[in-house]
């Protein structure tokens, strides 16, 4: 069991922040204010969510879980959508994709008796799935816009030769989905060797036996991998169509 972290120890964490702030100042990176503000904001957000979770855990499971998941998905949708400015129906589609992926993963957890339908189990694990899905969607959207912009000439030529939008975009779709999945693929290759993942570390610090902690980590790691793959593929398959009009001509999406 890890020792309780005192208020004084928490305050002294400021020295961890001073390291990147000092490096930014020494090398004139211009990130000092951003680092300080992000650190302060992150700490405040974590403390606030701690009180929120304490309240949610006291509610009936269905109500508490539903409220928190709705907030998580909504915030994730807004952040992911920043990478796809100019694409029609962006936020509604992202919201539906994240909800669908989360419900599928949750159904598998419950159906295979991996966790209980309790806020203290569903919310933390769902947060990791939703967060990684958000990152994968953001990467897919960002890569999609750049790939279609760079390959515009080739796509237009393919369309002129009689190819349909899906045929002209096949190679790009593969590249986009692959790029969104690579970080998680690389992470799985080194899991347990280069780093001990967060869930496993937290459970061990909480006094859980390492083997039992590993079981939970395997569940969440593979769940994240599945959700990332599915989310990236869904948004790519859905949104690439908006780069073409009804006449199968390529469009230039305006950024607002």
Image (cartoon, rainbow, N blue to C red):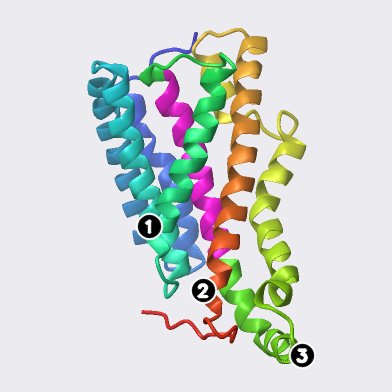
Q: Nearer the viewer, residue 96 or 129?
A: 96
Who comes first in sequence, dot 3 or dot 2? 3
Horizontal side of 197 relative to 252 (left or right) equals: right
Q: Residue at x 48, y 37 (%)?
A: 102
The image quarter containing residue 139 is bottom right
- Disc 3: which residue: 161
Q: Residue at x 74, y 87 (%)?
A: 162
Q: Nearer the viewer, mark 3 or mark 2?
A: 3
- Please provide percent x and percent y for residue 15: 41, 40
Q: Nearer the viewer, residue 155 or 159?
A: 159
Q: Do residues under tags 3 and 2 come within 8 Å of each other at their CB atoms?
A: no
Q: CA distance from mark 1 to mark 3?
A: 34 Å
Residue 252 position (above or below residue 108): below
Residue 12 position (above or below residue 161): above
Who comes first in sequence, dot 1 or dot 3? 1
- Please provide percent x and percent y for residue 39: 36, 47
Task: Report helix, strand or loop for mark 3.
Answer: loop
Q: Number of marks in the image? A: 3
- Disc 2: which residue: 242
Q: Residues within 10 Å of mark 1 (few under 14, many from 20)?
A: few
Quadrant where the C terminus is found in the figure? bottom left
Magenta stretch: give its range: 121-141
């Amino acid at each position: 069991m890890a020792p309780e972290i005192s208020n004084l120890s928490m305050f002294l964490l400021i020295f961890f922040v001073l390291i990147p702030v000092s490096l930014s100042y020494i090398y004139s990176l211009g990130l000092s204010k951003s680092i300080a503000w992000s650190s302060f904001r992150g700490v405040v957000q974590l403390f606030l969510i701690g009180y929120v979770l304490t309240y949610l855990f006291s509610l009936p499971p269905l109500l508490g879980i539903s409220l928190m998941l709705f907030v998580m998905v909504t915030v994730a949708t807004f952040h992911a959508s920043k990478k796809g400015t100019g694409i029609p129906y962006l936020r509604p589609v992202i919201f539906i994709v994240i909800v669908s992926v989360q419900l599928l993963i949750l159904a598998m957890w419950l159906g295979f008796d991996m966790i209980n339908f309790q806020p203290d189990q569903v919310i933390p694990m769902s947060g990791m799935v939703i967060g990684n899905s958000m990152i994968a969607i953001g990467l897919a959207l960002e890569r999609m816009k750049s790939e279609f912009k760079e390959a515009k000439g080739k796509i237009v030529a393919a369309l002129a030769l009689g190819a349909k939008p899906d045929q002209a975009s096949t190679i790009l779709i593969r590249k986009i989905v692959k790029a969104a999945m690579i970080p998680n693929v690389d992470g799985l290759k080194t899991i347990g060797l280069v780093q001990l993942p967060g869930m496993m570390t937290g459970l061990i610090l909480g006094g859980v036996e390492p083997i039992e902690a590993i079981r939970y980590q395997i569940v969440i790691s593979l769940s994240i991998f599945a959700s990332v793959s599915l989310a990236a593929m869904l948004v790519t398959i859905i949104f690439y169509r908006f780069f073409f009009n009804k006449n199968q001509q390529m469009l230039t999406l305006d950024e607002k």
